[in-house]
Image: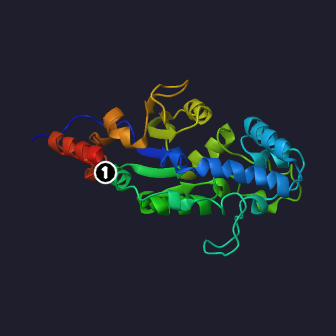
Amino acid sequence: MGISTIASPFDSIIFDLDDTLYPSSTGIDKCVKKNIQLFLIQKCGFSESKALTQRVELFKTYGSTLAGLRAQGLDITAEDYHGLNFSFFSLRPSFVHGRLPYDSIDTDHQLRNLLLSIKQRKIVFTNSDRIHAMRALDRLGIKDCFEQIICFETINPNLPYSTRPDEFPILLKPSLDAFKIALDAANVDPRRTLFLDDSVRNIAAGKEMGLHTVLVGKTMKSKGADYAVESVHNLAQVIPEIWANEMDGGDPTMTRSKSELEAVLACALVGA
């Protein structure tokens, strides 16, 4: 069988984490929202009704509750909010992520097989802190499938050194500045990079940065989305060109015959 002459348009693939690599049905997102509201009540003194409206408004306006609180002048640190300095095995939990039901995230063998079949660089880009990302990826059984994790700490390296809340505004997706930092940290060419996220706003921002975009969790494309997949497991069905042959001096490990490519896609589809 001859070598396929189809060249993959992608050198790198960047994955969002929450509600992208694992589904919203785990209940993690609902618990995060609940914990944020408890934080606003217990740490900021808001009433229960005020905490709910503030969480929603701050997210819409600033991209996260923490970013909004600091932008409004409240001296809330990332350590207060995330517990970023706590040991992975610390008995003291972080407020927002330390009380999550990580046991609801099951090992995903099908996703692992899919990721292992992808020979391009694979990177996680999440607004969450590193401890949360590592715990979620570990529960999924795919932590070792990624070359790099770009997270809250990556995008906000100067935050621990701030002396006042407005000195270093928090950057998160969908901020274009956050994307610029992430793409620079990943050292990727956006024109050769596929970006997956469940957020319509993040997808639109990624497209503005020149990335190829995949909206996850939907069957219809949003503005700025090149593709839409109901689940990350459907990548092989919707974007088979990920597995196409790398030509013209590319990585020889990505060179496949047509029959080999078909076998890879079949394996990814059934999770064998």
**Residue 186 appears left or right of 242:** right
Between 168 and 86, the one lying in front of the other is: 86
Residue 263 location in percent, x, y?
19, 45
Type of amino acid under label 1: Ser
> Which image quadrant: the N terminus?
top left
The answer to whether 82 is drawn above or below residue 169 in the figure is below
Q: Residue furthest front?
A: 48
Q: Secondary structure at mark 1?
A: helix
How many numbered marks, from 0 up? Answer: 1
Question: Which of the 4 image quadrants contains residue 245?
Answer: top left
The residue drawn where x is 64% and y is 57% is 129
The 10 Å Cα crowd at callout 1, few under 14, some 14 to 19, many 20 or more, is some
The residue drawn where x is 53% and y is 49% is 17
Q: Residue furthest left?
A: 1
The residue drawn where x is 66% and y is 59% is 97
Residue 212 location in percent, x, y?
47, 33
**Residue 114 appears left or right of 26:** left
Residue 235 location in percent, x, y?
37, 39
What residue sits right under mark 1 in the picture? 117
Question: Which of the 4 image quadrants contains residue 71?
Answer: top right
Between 200 and 254, the one lying in front of the other is: 200
Would residue 127 be seen by someone viewing this image from the given angle? no
Residue 79 location in percent, x, y?
76, 63
The answer to whether 86 is drawn above or below residue 1 in the figure is below
Between 95 and 11, the one lying in front of the other is: 95
The answer to whether 65 is drawn above or below residue 78 in the figure is above
Would residue 264 be seen by someone viewing this image from the given angle? yes
